[in-house]
Image: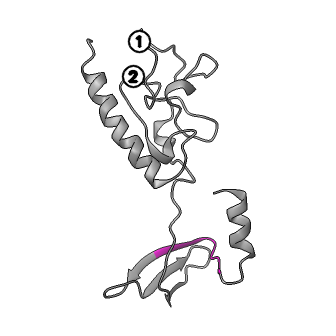
Amino acid sequence: MSRYLIQRITENPDIELHYKTEIVNLDGDTRLECVTWIDRATGETSSHEIPHVFIMTGASPRTEWLHGCVAMDNKGFILTGRDLDSSVEFAPARAWPLARPPQMLETSLPRVFAVGDVRSGSVKRVASAVGEGAIAVHLVHRALAEPH
């Protein structure tokens, strides 16, 4: 999340922040009426009449399971395309194995693509992730048509 947005949220008296909480239930008939969360620090569960919820995803890439499979930046976001240059140490360290350069959304593992918030340098917007997904489908077809 950008610094200016964090500042606007924390300084807004109409926004109440709940740290170390997890939403465990959303309830309502035709619209959201009630949100239930658990305070992970105390274990207390509480329900509140709230008509809106804003969900922020993608701030943390959650790519620990890929460590050693594809090249990532120092924050764990996956490097793709042009970001895969000789200055990046692949994990595991190895040179790009194909004669062609990596395609735009291709990871350091040939024919494996990454799109959306998990990708280093992504815009962090849903519309961009959807667009990248559509492009990736085309790139996958192109990669599958390559001779092996």
Q: Is residue 17 magenta?
A: yes
Residue 129 lies, in percent from the top left, at 44, 47
For residue 5, side relative to residue 96 (left or right):
right
From this viewpoint, which residue is outermost toward the top?
Answer: 99
Q: Is residue 58 left or right of residue 11?
A: left
- Is 16 placed above or below 102 here? below
Q: Secondary structure at mark 1?
A: loop
Pick whichever of labels 1 and 2 is earlier in the sequence.
1
The image shows a total of numbered marks equal to: 2
Residue 5: % across, % down = 68, 63
Q: Is residue 71 visible?
A: yes
Q: Is residue 91 visible?
A: no
Percent coordinates x, y for residue 8 in the rendering: 71, 69
Q: Is residue 1 left or right of residue 8?
A: left
Tell me whether circle 1 and circle 2 mark residues in contact (CB < 8 Å): yes
Residue 80, placed above or below residue 87: below
Q: Read off the residue under disc 2.
A: 110
Q: Residue at x 57, y 54 (%)?
A: 59
Residue linked to disc 1: 98
Which range of residues does the magenta coloring cover? 15-23
